[in-house]
Image (cartoon, grey):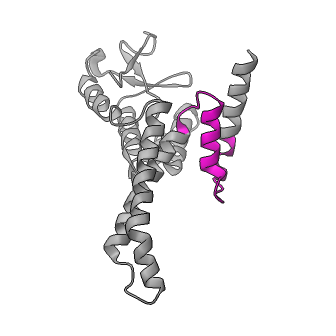
Amino acid sequence: MAFQFTRWGNPDIATCAFKLPDMPFGISHGLRGAIDAYCEALRNIGDTEAQIAKLCAQVLRFEANGLPDTVAKILIQLHRDNAGLDGDTLLLIAPGGDPKAFAASEAILDDLYRLMPQDWVSARAHYESALAAENEYDRRVWKPAWETSEAGGQKVSKLINEEMERLQDIRCNAENILLDVPAPDWPAFAFKYLICFDNDRDLNGYHEDLCAEAKRLLAEVQS
């Protein structure tokens, strides 16, 4: 299975509980921030139920920008409906102690996870396919239409602009997934770095993640 809940083995917490899974690769930064705030509030005993409910609502109101966002929202809703906590670990408490309580959710999530890249090879292939589609449409359709418009001819049509934007969104979503997947080696790290900073790009939001990844790769080499 591409997705499976992990049983949590602490009977003092609940007869049957499962660890809330990690969020999928590639969720939007805004959604990640909202989820982090919700999770932090759950761990903070000083936060009230009303505060937690408000933070959860912010997560669920976030407009999903792709499948990873949708899956993340499903996971948070599952937790909200079956909330548990053991130390800092967020749990799903099975209603009635039934170990099969989340079987239907697990099956649906498995279907969704199989539609998303789960490793570097598949994430890079997904990204390169999306980038190729965007570049091809830009070369074959959008740029000629723009050049015609710049030369005083017909303006770029709404349909052409919308298709260009759609392909850009697909590429951006694929890019987010790839940048989230741990680089298995230094060439992969270099590939991610160039996505962020080559061709006059400056994705400053990834500085900390890239630094952490560089430290991890260095530690692996030195071990």
Q: In terms of depth relative to the viewer, which is nearer, 91 or 131?
A: 131
Total number of numbered labels?
0
Q: Is residue 22 magenta?
A: no
Q: In terms of depth relative to the viewer, which is nearer, 116 or 142?
A: 142
Which quarter shows the N terminus? top left
The secondary structure that dominates the magenta segment is helix
Instruction: Using the image, determine if residue 17 lies above or below residue 182.
Output: above
Residue 122: x and y in percent read 43, 33
What segment carries the magenta color?
A: 180-208
Which quarter shows the C terminus? top right
Residue 193: x and y in percent read 65, 44
Q: Left or right: 220 with respect to 95?
A: right
Q: Can residue 51 be seen here?
A: no
**Residue lying at the far left of the rendered structure:** 104
Residue 94: x and y in percent read 32, 21
User: Which residue corresponds to the image point at 56% horizontal and 25% vertical from the top-left?
Assistant: 88
Q: Can residue 11 be seen here?
A: yes
